Amino acid sequence: MGVAVFAPGRIARPTFRFSLSGMGLVFGVTVAALALVLVSLAGSLLASISTGAALGGFSLDNYARLLRDSRLPRVTVQTLELGLGSALVMLAFAFPLAWLLGRTDFRWKRLLFTLLTAKLAVPGFITAMAYVWLLNPTAGILNRMLVAP
């Protein structure tokens, strides 16, 4: 909001200016990224309930087949172990870094903070999807470029 200057006999009106700098730009990029994630999730959900390659029929048979699979308990346990192990490794790195940033005043503190914050700009889900799109064995962009037609 702009500053209103008062003059005798004139009505002061506030001036409004919209700027894409600062928080407005961050908000816009965040909304766009969230929209892309939601479109990807909706596509995955739609594909999971479709009956064939085309989106003609819908059924929950895919989920029933998943729940009947004898490998599901083993895969679930392995997934939980991987998640817990990843969290412990990240904690082993994050705790000392947080202590350095919060309790000390070392020379490269601003650089370290900037590098750690930059990693937050690209969510892990987006990074994982990028690897899937690039390295998928059947339809990945890199695999298509490397394999002769």
Image (cartoon, rainbow, N blue to C red):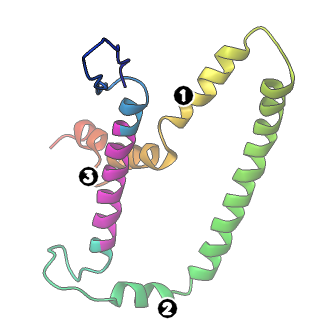
Q: Which residue is mark 2?
A: 68
Vertical comparison of 72 with 117: above or below: below
Kindly report which numbered mark, 2 or 1, lies closer to the viewer in this rendering.
1
- Who is closer to the viewer here, 8 or 60? 8
Assign a secondary structure to mark 3.
loop
Mark toward the start of the polypeptide (2 vs 3): 2
Left or right: 8 with respect to 130? left
Residue 143, image x, y percentages:
30, 43
Vertical comparison of 48 with 125: above or below: below
Residue 48 is covered by the magenta coloring: no
Mark toward the start of the polypeptide (1 vs 3): 1
Q: For the residues marked 1 and 3, what is the alpha-carbon distance in whole angstroms?
A: 30 Å
Residue 3, image x, y percentages:
38, 17
Residue 18, image x, y percentages:
29, 27
Q: Which residue is mark 3?
A: 139
Magenta range is: 28-45
Residue placed farthest to the top in the image?
Answer: 107
Kindly report which numbered mark, 1 or 3, lies closer to the viewer in this rendering.
1
Instruction: Characterize the magenta stretch by its predominant secondary structure.
Output: helix
